[in-house]
Amino acid sequence: MQKNVFLINTLNTHYVMGVNDDGVLQHIHWGAKMPVDQYSVFNEWERNSNHSELDYTKEEYSVFGGTRYRAAALKCIHADGCRDSVFTFKSVTRDEGLLEITLTDSEYDVDLVLSYAYGSDHDIITRSVTVVNNGNAAITLERVFSAELNLPSRSPYKVINTNGSWGAEFLTESNELNNGTVVYESKKGIAGHTHSPFVIMHRDATEDWGDVFFAALGYGGNFKIEVNRDFCNTTRCMLGISDFDFSYTLGAGEKFTAPKVYMGYTCGFTAMSNMMNDFAVDNILPKGYAKKHLPVLYNSWEATEFDVNTRDQLALARIAADIGCELFVMDDGWFGKRNNDRAGLGDWYVNTDKFPNGLGELIDGVNSLGMDFGLWFEPEMVQQDSDLYRAHPEWTYHYDSRTPSLLRHQLVLNLTRDDVREYVFDCMDSMLSKYNIRYIKWDMNRPFSEIGTDNLENGKELWYRHTMAVYDIADRLHKKYPYLQLEACASGGGRAELGAMEHFDMVWTSDNTDPVDRLYIQRGYSMLYPRKCMRAWVTDAGGSCRCSDDFRFNTSMQGSLSIGSHLLKKDKKTLQGYKEYIARYKSVRDTIQFGDLYRLANYDCDGVFITQYVSKDKSQSVLFISTAPTSLFNKQDKEFVLKGLDPNADYECRYNDNTYRHSGRFLMNKWHKVTIGGALQSRIVVLNRV
Ligand code: DGJ
């Protein structure tokens, strides 16, 4: 291989860069493996006075300046006012699984370190960028994207992201990008419910076939993804912190590392989802619970809302334990003067009207039923009707000249202040040190507004610093209480992304617990995020006429099964049913939480949802078949084949009171007919290797 060419060799792919005669780091190849001695750089040339060679060069990380007239990954302002950057190759280091290429500015003492972590057992490359200010004056960063991706071929790509909202998260949509730029972004302070900090790019790929290029940002603050197809028909993508109100002052001798990007190339969407699922379990999730299955939990929010007390919560807990729940979570309403959503946030001490003797009796009771206890917090928030706000109105983001905008009657605390961060940590710490609390649901129910900070010299740092503060507090809690499980929630799925999942053990995917809607939401989530982290409640949403318990459980069993129904309103027979569903889930939970996923059919294309999970050792497979809300006569027969089984093994399953035994080869090649017996029917089929 040429000296100026750098290769990253993953399980099935090569990612190749090289330095051209001008010292510019070029992107050379991302895709299938090829003979390594055949990779080389290509020196472009100025084609006429309007198009410099940089227009044609696939730069690995383009910076603002010179004759670049396209979006740049980096933009910085030097102390003398110069906004032009010139970064050329300086050095390269390679350690086991880590390639670092340093570029340096010709005039200013600033380095850019592009780092690529990779492994030989997967195809995910973890990229990040560090700006190092070795000079003796501060520089201002206006844009530091985490990665730029250059895609092969000149034909247009389809770009997949989500276009959702509260209660409708993860609704994937596709744009065919013929020219110009498509942007997916959050400006709310968190990733939010609309677009997702990931991107999938392909040209007519399917679940099993076709080139799929994807990347997900490990950051849940304001993010931005830009995909552009230029006049040469070259498609490029950039991912990073949104620059809509970003700026960061990098003092002399300081470094700034942009959030990580996890990117990969696979054949088909199924390989992408399974590779990212496994990668997240092995490399992203907090170590404590990453490889343990998550417990079946009961959360009392939809049953009791703010009306919580020891007697009622214990009554629910008794039933929850009896049906097989392993963890009982008391949600909102236990603290301060929290009788509705108008007061109390910030006062994280027990409401003594509701719990005159504290939480001890409830927690002991839950524990004596054999369950762990979990508690809800919304740590980043305060309400004007709270002791905290009365004492410290200055602790919120605010401008003295502006009336603060309330959403859900609440304001966002300025977590960029050390004292506020300490207060927030101490509130949770004091509850955790006093009580046997083993689970915290960390909620976040409104976007930022009036984003003034008195404490920051560069106020535009707040978005980034706030996100880092959340991660820092979560890490400190995990460190001090290694048994603690943390759930990230933001009005449902506003924080269901890989940035949160590096610090929280699981996420709440949506406040929408309607099981039909949830199939769409779960499908979008499953594209790039780990299944085990997806909390999925069975609730009473929509009433019994909308969906049967079969349907509800078969939907929620496709992630981390949880229960949110009002158990005190269920009759004995229903509860016996719940008990059986939960027992069934426990018998297949490892396959679902850690196995491979195959999306066999969905409502939009097939009129039926079929999802198949296969354990890693291929000894068990679980199939969920759910029919649509409509059942059209004469369109009732559907056919599908199974995937991922051991072709040489026999599998046995029970279906319609009969036992069937077939080889994996048969099951994966013979198209099986399902006849839809009506709208909103649901079946689970478990196949065990004989
Ligand atoms: C929003 C969450 O998404 C719900 O699950 C619940 O915790 C409420 N907040 C409580 O206020």
Image: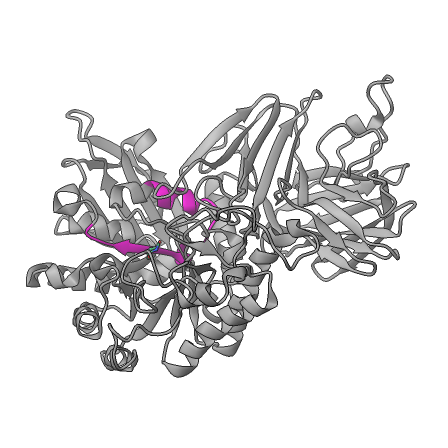
Q: Is residue 452 visible?
A: yes
Residue 349 lies in quadrant: bottom left
Residue 688: x and y, percent? 29, 58
Q: Is residue 634 above or below residue 302?
A: above
Residue 679 lies in quadrant: top left
Residue 193: x and y, percent? 43, 43
Residue 75 lies in quadrant: top right
Q: Is residue 530 magenta?
A: yes
Q: Nearer the viewer, residue 483 or 580?
A: 483
Q: Nearer the viewer, residue 363 or 571?
A: 363
Q: Residue drawn at (30%, 60%), measured in percent from left and top?
A: 588
Quadrant position of ligand 1: bottom left
| Magenta segment boundaries in residue numbering | 520-540
Q: Residue drawn at (65%, 27%), measured in percent from left and top?
A: 153
Which quarter of the image is occupied by the C terminus? bottom left
Residue at the far front: name it. Answer: 401
Q: Is residue 651 above or below residue 55?
A: below
Which quarter of the image is occupied by the N terminus? top right
Q: Is residue 532 magenta?
A: yes
Q: Residue drawn at (12%, 52%), measured in percent from left and top?
A: 657
Q: Is residue 152 above or below residue 468?
A: above
Residue 267: x and y, percent? 53, 39
Residue 186: x and y, percent? 53, 42
Residue at the far left: name it. Answer: 572
In the image, 234: left or right of 197? right
Q: Is residue 11 visible?
A: no
Q: Nearer the viewer, residue 271 or 259?
A: 259
In the image, 55: left or right of 564? right
